[in-house]
Amino acid sequence: MGLPVGVPVALVPGVLALLPEYASIEDPVAELRAAALSAVGGLGPRVLVVASEATGGSGRRVGEALVAAVGAAVVAGAGAGSCAPDPAMPGSQAHDPAQGATGVLVIGNGSATRTEKAPGHLDERAESFDDAVRAALASLDFTGVDASLAAELWADVEAMRVLPEVVSGPGEICYRDAPFGVAYCVARWAAGDGADRSLTERPADG
């Protein structure tokens, strides 16, 4: 089952705090949530969610909740379960629901070992690893991101490896921080023709 191309793409972390039940009066990740919802909101009405199984399915759960929160629907695709053909889709799209997607949402995060209180405790290799992930997002080349080290640092980067296949336009990092000692990044890429796949970073407020 192929991945759609020429559609907008977003990257958000699969942190459980982004689930709607955690958006209380004192939202612990208000800034992250706002950035994630804004990025997902630009993916259109039919979103393909791509997430690894590293988090036991929680990443996909977060992605699907964000899609629902912006009023869109999740379409079946790679790792998204089976889906009956949609008779409203012409040709091959009826047999490959992913090709009917208007956007792709990729779930992943950097290390979870940035501080002593982080889920994986402090690991001095975390900062340089996260710098490598940031460079990979900019170049769309993940060959330099060590999968074994990612596992040691509690990072969830496997789904990010589809980005070179689906990104077709310029992108922007909308949020990058490490609250609770976990490296989170929200990025979005516009639809395009593949000629410009540059990535910029929005300046921090203040």
Image: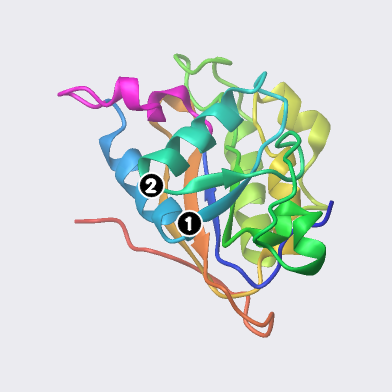
- Looking at the rendered structure, the secondary structure element under dot 2 is loop
Which percent across, then down, holds residue 137?
63, 57
Residue 56 vs 201, above or below: the answer is above
Q: Residue at x 80, y 39 (%)?
A: 146
Q: Is 62 within the magenta?
A: no
Q: Which residues are magenta?
A: 14-27
Picture quadrant of residue 69: top left
Which percent across, then down, holds residue 29?
31, 31
Position of residue 200 in the picture relative to residue 41 (left or right): right
Position of residue 66 in the picture relative to residue 205 (left or right): right
Picture quadrant of residue 61: top right
Q: Which mark is residue 197?
A: none
First in sequence, mark 2 or 1: give its number: 1
Q: Residues within 10 Å of mark 1 (few under 14, many from 20)?
A: some
Q: How many marks?
A: 2
Which percent across, then down, holds residue 45?
48, 56
Pointer 2 residue: 71
Amino acid type, residue under disc 1 in the picture: Pro
Name the quarter where the C terminus is drawn. bottom left
Amino acid type, residue under disc 2 in the picture: Gly
Q: Residue at x 65, y 48 (%)?
A: 133
Which percent across, then down, holds residue 199?
55, 69
Residue 156 vs 138, above or below: the answer is above
Q: Name the foreground residue: 47 vs 166.
A: 47
Pointer 1 residue: 45
Q: Residues within 10 Å of mark 2 (few under 14, many from 20)?
A: few
Q: Name the foreground residue: 23 vs 132.
A: 23
Whether residue 141 appears in this view of the structure is no
Residue 90 vs 76, above or below: the answer is below
Position of residue 87 in the picture relative to residue 34 (left or right): right
